[in-house]
Every structure is written in structure tokens, then in C-alpha cells.
Amino acid sequence: MRQYAPLAGFLLLVFAISATGAAVTATSIPTWYAALNKPETNPPNWVFGPVWTSLYIMIAISGWRVWRLFEGARFTAKFFAPIMRPYWIQLLLNCLWSIAFFGFQSPLFGVIVISFLYAAIMWNLVAFGHADKTATYLLIPYAIWVSFALHLNHAILTLN
């Protein structure tokens, strides 16, 4: 059971980041976002919640799987391990995208941040690929979804 405490910590951390982004997003959806011109490929709003929930669970499990490889190491050694850097960076950028796009109501700022987010996810895939294949596979749907989100964000920038 003790080995699952860090998994709970990863889930809490990832969902705290998600909640921060959601708090910024929620106020803009019925007003600013609803008024934007969107591409035909834009899914209905109800799709985003279940997709992101699934992705956040996979992101948390992925990070936890790599974290477990450092058994016996001090917390700070695990947290600052080079292999974990892209993980923490992509989580930060994930939250920053919500702030950029919805908080600042800026599709341009959103495109800039999500471009860095996508690059960080790719870096994360490569880093985790050297340590745990399952952790890497868990991030692939996230990379695909963010690539689609980048397309949507760019299309919204272009249409507005």
C-alpha cells in the first residue's frame, strides 16, 4: 500500500493543476469563448471535460511510474532528477495555457504557450522512453490531444 501513496500524490498534484486551469477557464467559456469563431473541427464543449480527465489520470500515472524508479532516493533527488524535468515543465505549461488562452483571452498568447507545451510533451516522451515504456505510452494520447488543441487554437487565432 505504501507504494501507492506517491500515486495519490501525483493524482492530487495533476488534478490541482487541472483545477487551477479550470477555474480560469470556467468564467470565459459562456462569454468570451462562446462568441469566438471556431473551426468546423472544434468539438462540442462537453467533450473537453471527459477527455482532459482521462488524460490527467494517464499523465499522473506516467509520472508516478518513473518516480518509482528512484526508490530509496531522497524526495528532492527524485523531484529534481533530470528525467523528471520535462514532466514538471509540461505540467506548468499545461496550466499556463489555460491562463494564456482563457484567462488573458488571447488566442495568440495561447498559440505561443501551447507550442512550448507540445515541445515539452515531446521532450517528456523522449526522456521517459529511456526509463519506462508504459509511462511513455501513457503520454501519447496527451501528445495527440495537445497537437489537436494546437490546431484548434491556431484556427481560432486565424478566424478571429
Image: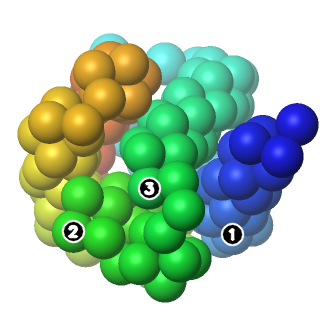
Query: Which three-letter amino acid code belongs to the residue tagged 2?
Result: Pro
Residue mark closest to the camera, 3 vs 2: 3
Q: Tag 2's secondary structure?
A: helix
The answer to whether residue 21 is left or right of residue 124 is right
Q: From the viewer's perspective, is residue 143 above or below residue 105?
A: above
Of helix, strand and loop, which one carries label 1?
A: helix
Q: Residue furthest right?
A: 1
Q: Position of residue 35 (x, y in %)?
A: 53, 49
110 vs 155, nearest the viewer: 110
- Quadrant occupied by the N terminus: top right
> Which of label 1 and label 2 is nearer to you?
2
Residue at the spot of label 1: 20
Q: Determine which residue is flagged by label 3.
A: 70
The image quadrant that residue 116 belongs to is bottom left
At horizontal 24% and vertical 58% (from top left) the residue drawn is 83
- Give whichever of discs 3 and 2 has the lower sequence position: 3
Closest to the observer, 25 or 36? 25
Residue at position x 69%, y 69% in the image? 20
Q: Mark 1 or mark 2, which has the lower sequence index?
A: 1
